[in-house]
Amino acid sequence: MAGGLADYADLDLDRSVRRGYPEAVFCAGKTPAQVRGIAAAVRTRPDVVTLFTRAGADHAAAIRAELPDARHDTDAALLAWPPSPPPPTGGLVVVAAAGTSDLPVAREAELTARYLGRPTELVVDVGVAGLHRILARLDLLRRARAVVVAAGMDGALPSVVAGLITAPVVALPTSVGYGAAFGGLAPLLAMLNACAPGVAVVNIDNGYGAGHLAAQIAADPAR
Amino acid sequence: MAGGLADYADLDLDRSVRRGYPEAVFCAGKTPAQVRGIAAAVRTRPDVVTLFTRAGADHAAAIRAELPDARHDTDAALLAWPPSPPPPTGGLVVVAAAGTSDLPVAREAELTARYLGRPTELVVDVGVAGLHRILARLDLLRRARAVVVAAGMDGALPSVVAGLITAPVVALPTSVGYGAAFGGLAPLLAMLNACAPGVAVVNIDNGYGAGHLAAQIAADPAR
Amino acid sequence: MAGGLADYADLDLDRSVRRGYPEAVFCAGKTPAQVRGIAAAVRTRPDVVTLFTRAGADHAAAIRAELPDARHDTDAALLAWPPSPPPPTGGLVVVAAAGTSDLPVAREAELTARYLGRPTELVVDVGVAGLHRILARLDLLRRARAVVVAAGMDGALPSVVAGLITAPVVALPTSVGYGAAFGGLAPLLAMLNACAPGVAVVNIDNGYGAGHLAAQIAADPAR
Amino acid sequence: MAGGLADYADLDLDRSVRRGYPEAVFCAGKTPAQVRGIAAAVRTRPDVVTLFTRAGADHAAAIRAELPDARHDTDAALLAWPPSPPPPTGGLVVVAAAGTSDLPVAREAELTARYLGRPTELVVDVGVAGLHRILARLDLLRRARAVVVAAGMDGALPSVVAGLITAPVVALPTSVGYGAAFGGLAPLLAMLNACAPGVAVVNIDNGYGAGHLAAQIAADPAR
Amino acid sequence: MAGGLADYADLDLDRSVRRGYPEAVFCAGKTPAQVRGIAAAVRTRPDVVTLFTRAGADHAAAIRAELPDARHDTDAALLAWPPSPPPPTGGLVVVAAAGTSDLPVAREAELTARYLGRPTELVVDVGVAGLHRILARLDLLRRARAVVVAAGMDGALPSVVAGLITAPVVALPTSVGYGAAFGGLAPLLAMLNACAPGVAVVNIDNGYGAGHLAAQIAADPAR
Amino acid sequence: MAGGLADYADLDLDRSVRRGYPEAVFCAGKTPAQVRGIAAAVRTRPDVVTLFTRAGADHAAAIRAELPDARHDTDAALLAWPPSPPPPTGGLVVVAAAGTSDLPVAREAELTARYLGRPTELVVDVGVAGLHRILARLDLLRRARAVVVAAGMDGALPSVVAGLITAPVVALPTSVGYGAAFGGLAPLLAMLNACAPGVAVVNIDNGYGAGHLAAQIAADPAR
Amino acid sequence: MAGGLADYADLDLDRSVRRGYPEAVFCAGKTPAQVRGIAAAVRTRPDVVTLFTRAGADHAAAIRAELPDARHDTDAALLAWPPSPPPPTGGLVVVAAAGTSDLPVAREAELTARYLGRPTELVVDVGVAGLHRILARLDLLRRARAVVVAAGMDGALPSVVAGLITAPVVALPTSVGYGAAFGGLAPLLAMLNACAPGVAVVNIDNGYGAGHLAAQIAADPAR
Amino acid sequence: MAGGLADYADLDLDRSVRRGYPEAVFCAGKTPAQVRGIAAAVRTRPDVVTLFTRAGADHAAAIRAELPDARHDTDAALLAWPPSPPPPTGGLVVVAAAGTSDLPVAREAELTARYLGRPTELVVDVGVAGLHRILARLDLLRRARAVVVAAGMDGALPSVVAGLITAPVVALPTSVGYGAAFGGLAPLLAMLNACAPGVAVVNIDNGYGAGHLAAQIAADPAR
């Protein structure tokens, strides 16, 4: 696609001021050249944290060509610039992953919340098939102001967690599972039908959205 | 529909002998006259237990016209004749209902298992939103040779139960829930994707099928 | 179904203490007799607010037989007892309904949040087909600590609102619309795919769940 | 497949005369050899504009072997011959893309409308998450006789645009988005349920169809 | 629901001026009392045509209590006030119904287009199972500036019509058909996949939307 | 709907001559008045057999007001006029119903084939849960030139029958079954995926279509 | 998988005698080694025609290693052995493909019918967007005893053909099309809902099944 | 992902003691490095059988680096360590595969049941298109205490088997088939709707789950 940045993107670098949170650049579906163009524009605004999500290897190289010190978490397929998150404010965000295979999106959620300014903790492999695992983390979960629960398969963990704590649960369905998980549809529906109230559902594998929502919930009200 | 029994049904009263379990008459979709015709034929074989499932008021009246002493459980929409179940053999079948609204199908499952010859127990309102409720029944659940778990909404209970016991869990999705339960699709998919192994799924609201399967699993091997 | 309360429900009146919010009684799927039994048990605990949701006329009469002074909002199909909500604490919850047909579930959400202790406001008929309507309410929306947005059809309103404010948006899809709304599936999917972050989705027509979640988000952190 | 053109295609080069618009050759699903055979036949009719859509690199090479001066837009995966569009007649067609990732299909729509004889304009990155972006283009949108709106994810932009202008909106859902977009199903349903009237929906990622429809709508009535 | 009009609707009677077409009142989902309140407000603005769509008998009575001379078309479940459509301007809108069962929505489309100011014609029972029927109407179809094609079942008629004429086709799927029509899903998908370009799809059974879109397309450009 | 027959139907009484089979009148979705109008027109052509399908009680009364001697099969919801089928020609059509609940559509299929001129036989309650039942009819099945197999639930019978005979099987899915039958979707999909070749699938509950197709297949080739 | 033929297949070479048609070997999902083992067994029975369907390049090489003179049609991904079809008997089978992209499955259907013993003809690019194309083949279509119609996208062609001829139409949906074709779902549903009777539907892209069914329908009754 | 085992997995090697069966490691979705870390931990507990399922070549190499003598079945994509299954106890588990393409998941089921301690037998290519094949195995099937039936396409085999034996059938749908099998959805639905009782359904292609469930059912009750 010929032409400059204005031909394919209308950056909104003041959004951080206007809405309180930085906008993220969703790399999947953009060409590396487009992403690089955006990265170049971003460079002029070090006061705003920018997240590049769903960044493949080509996207990452393009970003690093403009922002060499950007932090790149390959598991989460996420880059952040400036590389250090802001000092944490607000309440704790805990991210719980039901299984090891849920880790990439859980990690994307955790990093997003951290770069949006919250203190975070990540716990893994706490699915309901072994209840003792999640019960052992109850103290940590109850210290959180928002808990992100990533789960594929039956998507049962958010219901269980929401029944145990007072804070809202952000339910993050993942596309992990056998055939009838239908790419995350099964846990998505389970989470929408959680038998415990207090469950906020986001899109399948949308770790960024889950982390952003949790950061908003856990923000100090004065904000 | 004019004509006699042969015009609409091919009864298989020897099935009890051949396959070991009585056939059930699924009343929904049959006219009361057809059901009455079947009931009349059944009367000649008091040695075989016959179950009439999904029986509306009209069906029940038609059956009772031929089998006045048939037992009628209105909650489960089920009639049985002869009215008394056989003496129990085999292992215990426990039926657990996540919520009060799941009771009708849970009851259908329990009665089916009992009329097929198993000892049964029913526990209610043990959904995962309050884990203490199901944990309080753990001793009973662990005594069972098969546990039927009826749940709508998120369908999370079978995963949790299967993670706590050694016996197989028969997962019975119900059509209870808000919009995105889609008539039981949500718990059905959750149960098919149960993160704990040992979960046997049956059709939505199919209490008869769940009870039958549990009775087979809990039968003594010598059978 | 013969027998007493223990045969069909395991009430959890201490839940208010344990988890911080009262449990609700989902009436749809329960018989009036069952609901009445629960209401009778509730009467012994005036210190706990109890909500009865999805209550038809028969359910309401049964509840009122035990709790004559219960407040009954027929639009929202909801009863509350004791009749007065607690004094409001925490941040403001604003409930916005895209169209007049979305009012019943929007009202259920508002009343739930109010009975869980939050100050609430309700705005109506602010769908995106006439952007001036929602823009005229921007000041109110920006004062909220959580905004519930109820919409059927295209489910576009939550994306627009989330792009305008800092607080989280609880997106509440309704089953309002022509054929291809598929009973609320269309707005549900739209909300899960909201192009603005900060959108927490709940089940179709689940006003209770939306109000509960909003009340949790808007609670004072000290809680 | 051995044999000549008649074995796999029945070209309709008089269609331009009969129906008023040239037929397009949908390359996906055809072998490069088949496409080349069609290109050779096309060469005999320079009076008719022919569009080759969804052309991969192999298809493009095959077409260029016969029509070396064909215009190839790689973003839109489209080739046109003769290379220059006809002089514009009729009203303006504006194509608006919600996000950068929607650009390829938006571009396919714009080029189609232009090669069918309309004046066109393209605006990008005007999704509803930042309303100011689309509102800033209102003057341009209101000058159009038809507006194509390409959007993935929540598909909310067509509803908003249709509420702001008098001309018809051609809603073009794209397959851009996270899991629960289900390959474009989410924006497709949202657009079919647009709360503003005046929205004409076409198939997912069908930029050609959208551009063709817009060109017909914006044609001068005398045609 | 207690209170006045502002509690449930934000009427937009200037919309006719601002956007060029009157807003319609979608009655399904509103109470008769709400609809009556809207009708009372409408009475003050006889310069604006108002359409009440999907009006049941109760809605119609409520409307007539305020607007006794409103025109009521029971087949289309539509009321219009003032009762006479404006003098026709713009191009002809032809509405074609594939089968007799498609008539109610076809009629809703025709009346909508007429009350929005277009000359209209209606042809019936011209499904593709007997091609001679639609071919016999070819002259009329070719005189139209927009053709609405209502069809259930296979939804094949819009493809055929679009291949025969130059004007755009508004495809209106109906919920008519056997089981696998799935409430209109089958014709909806067929229309979205029409093999002829120039097909604009609207929602299932949405006669109002189809008529509105056709009226916009057939408007004189000067508008 | 005011007006005469031409306002809602374009009868095609010469279709019997042109295409070889009479057209049927699908009553569902038509008003009794419309159906009566069609019946009146039919009366002038006793040389053509007319079938009225999916006729409710109101439709039947309207038809009989014009065609008092029409044959009415209430099980199949079908009326035929003239009342006697033509003398049978061509090969035998056997209709097999898996269960008693499948009888209404099976009967519709049988009557349709008979009124289209084929000799027919009907066998019932031959589902695969008791293989001996269908195996006992093997001689009859092998005498047929076309076999219609009606089944709900798992839709397994057509696969089994097609594996046993040489003639084509017309698979007729019915909407009989528990929740996850999804109104006939389960047997429909099973039949489309029949592991034995020679299975022709028609729409859910479409007994008319199945009988018509079987009559065409079993017609003598000279026709 | 180690071991011989009995470990993975139970060949049924007498099926040709018993059921009248040879069994086909569906290669997709089998390893080349398995297919080669089957080919070796087939070599002993030259009196039976064997078809290998969905054969990739690896499968074809494995088959040819055992049956060097097998006929391989790469378009249809089909191999036949012995290489020559039997002398044709029975009525004509015409295969019509709506578009060029439908050719591979149309060709698979034609070859299957020919190897099962029928005379065949193939016509291409006769979709309903240009009705003159199919109307020009009417004489040929009316000479057929069975017509296979392959179509993707809107799946409209079978309805149109069935309305024009007396013989049964075998409708063969293909996975050709844009997004909302959903891999062939759209034409599949359209064909199941064909508004003309006489349409027999088979699975998506199942050219083998369509050709087999057509061959059975077009067989001489004496068979 | 940096860090040790605790960062991505919470192994539960006492599960074998607590629940009676070893936990399996689902490799798909885990990195080879993660799987290797788990394998290293497993090495310390040779008293517990560990299964690694869905192991690709990379996973297998990682496992073998730590557990060189692990048994690797490439067809089933499964590794077991220690390499020898325990001595068989309990009743016989028979695994029946409808077609050759169902073998990989059938083999996964058989190996799982064997490593969980049951005697097993595997029979192949016994689909219902040739009933004689399954009937020939009836003696073996009737000796089993649990039968796993793997089938794709129409999923009809479990219904047929369940009608012939007394033991429970574990129905294992596979993703084998043409388009409208929709990745295993068709056989899954068919199995959930099995017309014979006694069918326990597991997830699509979930051979591990089927084998585990069968092993539990066939365990000696004393367990």
Image (cartoon, coloured by chain):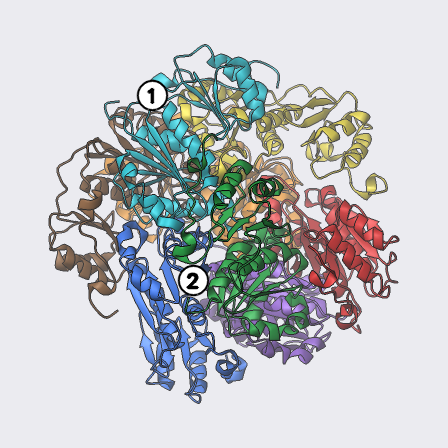
Chain colours: A cyan, B blue, C brown, D yellow, E orange, F purple, G red, H green
- Using the image, determine if residue A77 lies above or below residue G38: above
- Residue G15 percent across, percent down from the top left: 76, 69
The secondary structure type at the circle numbered 1 is: loop
Instruction: Give residue C152's quadrant in the image.
Output: top left
Which amino acid type is shown beneath numbered disc 1?
Gly
For disc 1, the neighbor class at 10 Å (few under 14, some 14 to 19, many from 20) is: some
Residue A20: give its label: 1
Instruction: Give residue B121's quadrant in the image.
Output: bottom left
The secondary structure type at the circle numbered 2 is: loop
Circle 2 residue: B168
- Residue H210 percent across, percent down from the top left: 52, 59
Instruction: Give residue E23's quadrant in the image.
Output: top left
For the point 35% across and 56% down, the residue is: B176
- Using the image, determine if residue B163 lies above or below residue A123: below
Q: Nearer the viewer, mark 2 or mark 1?
A: 2
For the point 35% across and 44% down, the residue is: A158
Q: CA distance from mark 2 to mark 1?
A: 51 Å
Whether marks 2 and 1 lie on the same chain = no
**Which quadrant is the N terminus of chain E positioned in?**
top left
Which amino acid type is shown beneath numbered disc 2?
Pro
A125 left or right of A196 in image: right
- Using the image, determine if residue A88 lies above or below residue E114: above
- Residue C205 percent across, percent down from the top left: 34, 46
Q: Circle 2 marks a residue in which chain? A: B
The answer to whether residue F153 is seen in the rendering is no
For the point 40% across and 37% down, the residue is: A202
> Is G21 or A149 nearer to us in this picture?
A149
